[in-house]
Image (cartoon, grey):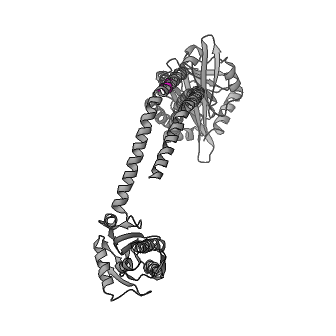
Amino acid sequence: MAKTKEEEAKVREVDEVGSSTVTIALIIELVVMAALIVIMTVTTGRLTRENALNHMATITDERAQIIENYVLNSEKTLRNFSKASQVRELLEIAQTVDMHNVVDKEAPGYDPDAYPEAKEALKKAQQYTIEFGNDVDNLEGVWIGTWETLVLTHTNGEGVVGMTTRKDPEKLKQLQDSMTNGDNGLYNAGIIISPATQKQILSMYIEVKNEKGEPIGLVGLGIFTEKLVDNLDKMTIKGIDDSFYSMVNTADNKYIFHTSKSLVTTEATIPKILEMTKNPPSVPGSFEYTDSKGKFISTYKYMDKYGWIMMLDAPRSEVYAMTNRMLIFVAIFGILIIGLILVFALLNKRQAEANRKLSRQIRKTEKTKESLTAAMFKDVLTNANNRVSFSMDLDGTTANDKKPYYFVMFNILDFSGINTAYGNDAGDAVLVHTADTLKECFPEGTVYRTGSDEFVVAVPAEDGSQDVQKKVMREARDAHGRLSAPMDANGNVITAAFKVGMAKKTGELNAAVITALKDLGNRQPGKTLIGQIQFTELR
């Protein structure tokens, strides 16, 4: 009872100290919270700015990918055209015939009845050129030409056939070298203004070789970029309504694309763009600039295969609009948190006493619960599990040959005689000594006191091997030997005798195993001799 009063005094002391430190804790909390709000504001501002730029960079990359896919599809179209048998057959014949005399009616050697084989091949190739062109969207023109750029077939018909597109030997050599040194013979001239239509096109050429790998001609393709531009114009960015795109050719610092059509083919004047055209960036990035319309942020990606810089621009106020809103939110949130802390401080004093009362009641309830649990499942004297616990632990459990259970019963012989001869305290000491010894000898087992003078050890086996069985038997013999030795019980030297039985159990486990172990012990006329523990298997 004195111990209980001492514990209650300590509880009251702890509660009083806790109450006195609440105010200090709240002051510290307010200081920490203010610091955290500042840190959160700075960090949130930085992160939201980074997220906004990353969002723009992702869109820039997507648009660059759209353009690149458009170019790659056009290259694939031209390659497919160059592989047609009609193309190769015509260019093979062109190696043996002066094609000027076949396609150019003004040529000195032109004869409408001459070169029937070449004219038949030309007819087939022209028909194929027209049919192929009909299947290509946004086509300006596709054509077949000799290695000297004499146009043999063209989707635009006879008005173009017979023309030589590169009469200047130097420009012809540049074109031929560009194809020879290009990607599998392909030269992408990029996005240009077509001399024929005065519209923006994607222009490219690819050489055609004979079986020896020698160039015998070329095919050319022009694709209008109007559809690509329309697709880019239709793409909007959520939250950045006033964004716009542009693309600059690093070769001449001129705009290839721009939302403002008037700027296309004009030179860029923004310093950062001028810097990038001289030293193309190796990785995507962003920059800020100011012009007559205000402050802008631009994210960019360099398309090194084509020498183009794709950019996405937006007003700085729009890009960081989310950042500003987030900062306001964090500030309001911080003020609310501080307000809540102050309110909590006012309520805390009234709540403290109620909390202390509740805490004491909870502790009493927990102690009562622990006492009830111990009384129900534990033997108060030996602290071993009782028979109720045995049934609760094992009922409904099933063992098998691979993982059996071993049970060892230790029954103190003539325990009532020990109580009579030496007193109940001595008898209690024998019981406690027995439980403690069994716990030490069976580290993997659970000890139960199943009767006034009876203990059962339950040992779950990891496997059904003989080694495990021998191990449990050794532990039983060790325990039997130690328990059979004389012991000091309240000043009395007592030598207790035991009946010991061991069983291996498979199948359903329940309290019936106790009865089976008792029957096994009853087969012995007297006490169990050390080293002669009876063993049986139960199913």
The image quarter containing residue 320 is top right
Q: Image check: 326 left or right of 413? A: right
Q: Tell me the quadrant of the picture where the C terminus can be found.
A: bottom left
Task: Report the front residue among 57 and 508.
Answer: 508
Mark count: 0
Which residue is rendered at x = 42% and y = 35% of the image? 354
Toward which corner of the image does residue 170 lie, by quadrant?
Answer: top right
Residue 84 drawn above or below residue 531: above
Residue 402, can we see it? no
Percent of width and height locating residue 205: 58, 33
- Residue range of the region highlighted in magenta in the rendering: 339-343
x and y percentages locating residue 321 in the rendered image? 53, 20
Task: Give residue 414's position: percent from left, percent from top.
Answer: 35, 81
- The structure residue drawn at horizontal position 36% and vertical position 57%, both measured from the top left corner, is 373
- Extreme residue toward the bottom, this view: 525
- Pick whichever, 186 or 69, lies toward us: 69
